């Protein structure tokens, strides 16, 4: 077993290097969140609700590819979690009720 790679159970990372490369390429563009439209602070650490995440437009559970550049978009972590594995259209983005950064710090 030593030196062998174990296939990941997460389909996003079965092609790990392709996914990481795609994630960096999308981040370099500096686009806003595809769900709420607000800017993304790409320097925030993972775990922060407004941190950058790579979202699949057509979820993997519905047949989407995790490494196809045409099937991914930049999102905030909180927006991506609220979207889940649903397909989203413009009406849904308005209904997410994403709080502003000021709301996060006032709690």
Image (cartoon, rainbow, N blue to C red):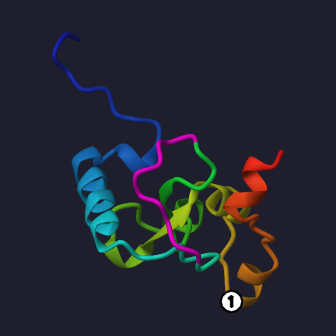
User: Is 49 located above or below residue 2 in the figure?
Assistant: below
Q: Position of residue 51 (x, y in %)?
A: 52, 53
Q: Position of residue 28 (x, y in %)?
A: 27, 67
Q: In this figure, what is the number of numbered marks?
A: 1
Instruction: Tell me if residue 13 is in the magenta stretch.
Output: no
**Residue drawn at (56%, 66%), measured in percent from left and top?**
59
Residue at image coords 41%, 76% = 31
* Res 84 seen here: no
Residue that badge 1 annotates: 90
Q: Is residue 62 left or right of residue 29?
A: right
**What is the magenta segment's predominant secondary structure?**
loop
Q: Residue furthest bottom?
A: 90
Q: Is residue 13 above or below residue 57?
A: above
Q: 101 or 72: which is nearer to us?
A: 101
Q: Closest to the observer: 25 or 84?
A: 25
Q: Point out the stretch of residues depicted in magenta.
A: 38-47
Q: Quadrant of residue 94?
A: bottom right
Picture quadrant of residue 42? bottom left
- Residue 5 in the figure: left or right of residue 89: left
Q: What is the secondary structure assignment of the residue under circle 1?
A: helix
| Number of residues whose C-alpha sits closer than 10 Å to that of mark 1, classed few (under 14), some (14–19) or many (20 or more) | few
Name the side, left or right, on which 14 lies relative to 86. Answer: left
Residue 92 in sight here:
yes
Q: Percent x, y for residue 88?
A: 67, 79
Name, please, the residue furthest toward the left: 3
Please say if 42 is above or below 72: above
Q: Is residue 44 magenta?
A: yes
Q: Can you say which quadrant of the picture contains the N terminus?
A: top left
Quadrant where the C terminus sits is top right
Q: Residue 25 or 12: which is nearer the viewer? A: 25
């Amino acid at each position: 077993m030593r030196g062998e790679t174990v296939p990941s159970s997460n389909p996003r990372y079965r092609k790990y290097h392709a996914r990481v490369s795609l994630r960096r390429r999308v981040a370099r563009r500096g686009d806003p969140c595809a769900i709420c439209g607000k800017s993304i602070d790409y320097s925030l650490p993972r775990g922060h609700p407004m941190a950058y995440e790579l979202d699949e437009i057509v979820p993997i559970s519905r047949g989407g590819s995790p490494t196809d550049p045409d099937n991914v978009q930049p999102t905030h972590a909180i927006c991506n979690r609220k979207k889940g594995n649903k397909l989203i259209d413009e009406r849904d983005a308005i209904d997410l009720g994403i709080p502003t950064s000021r709301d996060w710090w006032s709690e």
